[in-house]
């Protein structure tokens, strides 16, 4: 598997970064599932080509996305603390310069996605943009006490957020235009992102949709927080309506990302966001029914 991973890195590194925006990559088997067998969220994984100029450059089990362009790149998510070095290494392995990253974004403020963000900002020198509430949490490095998982969440290195963005705002890096969508279901600061990526004249509506699972820890009951339940249901409806041909998620298995990249399931699925939202809403309904029976 190690040799396979090296071959993959070599193949991806051979791709010409300058052509990335419109380049067509054959979908060679990634081997990423095998490479990560028995390994964890803090372990390195090889970069994985998703579509056109989009790559998963995260760790084993935690997604971080690179959206590449000749005029600078966007990176979404940073995994936990070891993720910063792993992500920077994967950017370099693809033949790109981490210093060409011009914007850093985050799915949500839990440490398994944000722990590496402060160091990644240092390595790349890129500004971090976040929704107002998320920005406050990142600056403090502390978990949100209103988070259903607050009792188990640890803090993270504080992150200097340089740009506050609002729901629906478009962020531009060269030809890349990414829209941020507030989708507070899994965490109070949850955000999802949409943009278009094109290969050989075929453009797909890309959607990186945050975790949608609703679960509480430390005795938290959603039944006691109707406003949190209402916000989650509104987020599910919003996700279902996103422009979405290729859905991706911070935890790859939530949208069968690797199976779809490897061709075991269709990568392009215009119902991908809708199905993801429906699964999440069914999960919330099950949770509320369980709480009602206790
Ligand atoms: Zn989380
Ligand atoms: Zn997570």
Image (spheres, rainbow, N blue to C red):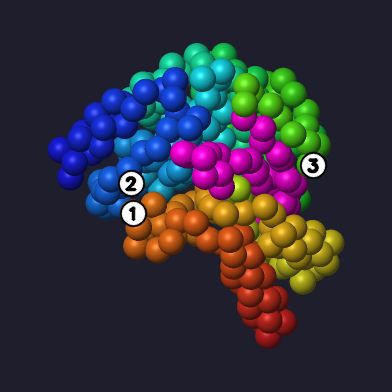
Contact between labelled residues 1 and 2, with CB atoms less than 8 Å apart = yes
Q: Looking at the rendering, in which quadrant would you find the C terminus?
A: bottom right
Q: Where residue 263 appears, x then y in whole percent?
A: 35, 58
Viewport quadrant of the N terminus: top left
CB contact under 8 Å: marks 3 and 2: no
N-term-proximal mark, 2 vs 1 = 2
Q: Which residue is mark 2?
A: 27
Confirm whether residue 120 shows in the render. yes
**Numbered range of the magenta stretch:** 176-204
Q: Identify the residue position indicated by label 3 in the image.
A: 167
Nearer the camera: disc 1 or disc 3: 1
**Looking at the image, residue 177 lies above or below residue 224:** above
The residue mark sitting in front, 3 or 2, is: 2
Provide the major secondary structure of the magenta segment. Answer: strand
Q: Is residue 289 left or right of residue 248?
A: right
Residue 225 in sight = no
Answer with the quarter of the image where residue 137 lies.
top right
Q: Nearer the viewer, residue 23 or 119?
A: 23
**Residue 290's x, y, as percent?**
65, 80
The residue that appears at 44% across and 25% down in the rendered structure is 19
The residue at the far front in this view is 201
Mark 2 vs ligand 2: CB below 8 Å = no
The dot on residue 279 is none
| Structural crowding at the residue carrying mark 1, measured as other residues with C-alpha within 10 Å and reported as few (<14), some (14–19) or many (≥20) | many
Lower position in the chain sequence, tag 1 or tag 3: 3
* Circle 1 residue: 262
Give the secondary structure at mark 1: loop
Residue drawn at x 65%, y 44% is 194
């Amino acid at each position: 598997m190690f040799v396979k991973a090296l071959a993959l890195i070599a193949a991806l590194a051979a791709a010409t970064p300058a052509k990335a925006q419109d380049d067509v990559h054959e979908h060679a088997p990634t081997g990423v599932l095998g490479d990560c067998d028995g390994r964890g969220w803090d372990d390195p994984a090889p970069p994985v080509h998703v579509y056109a100029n989009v790559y998963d450059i995260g760790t084993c089990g935690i997604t971080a996305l690179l959206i590449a362009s000749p005029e600078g790149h966007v990176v979404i998510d940073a995994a936990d603390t070891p993720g910063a070095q792993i992500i920077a290494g994967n950017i370099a392995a693809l033949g790109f310069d981490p210093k060409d990253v011009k914007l850093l974004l985050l799915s949500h403020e839990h440490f398994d996605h944000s722990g590496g963000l402060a160091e990644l900002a240092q390595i790349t020198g890129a500004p971090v943009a976040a929704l107002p509430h998320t920005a406050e949490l990142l600056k403090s490095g502390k978990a949100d006490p209103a988070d259903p998982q607050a009792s188990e969440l640890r803090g993270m290195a504080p992150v200097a957020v340089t740009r506050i963005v609002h729901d629906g705002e478009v962020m531009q890096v060269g030809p890349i235009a990414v829209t941020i969508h507030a989708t507070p279901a899994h965490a109070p600061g949850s955000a999802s992102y949409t943009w278009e990526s094109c290969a050989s004249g075929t453009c797909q509506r890309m959607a990186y949709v945050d975790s949608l699972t609703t679960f509480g820890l430390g005795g938290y009951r959603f039944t006691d927080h109707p406003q949190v339940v209402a916000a989650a249901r509104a987020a599910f409806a919003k996700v279902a309506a996103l422009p979405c041909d290729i859905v991706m998620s911070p935890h790859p298995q939530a949208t069968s990302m690797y199976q779809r990249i490897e061709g075991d399931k269709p990568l392009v699925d215009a119902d991908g966001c809708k199905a993801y939202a429906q699964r999440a809403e069914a999960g919330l309904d099950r949770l509320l029914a369980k709480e009602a029976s206790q």
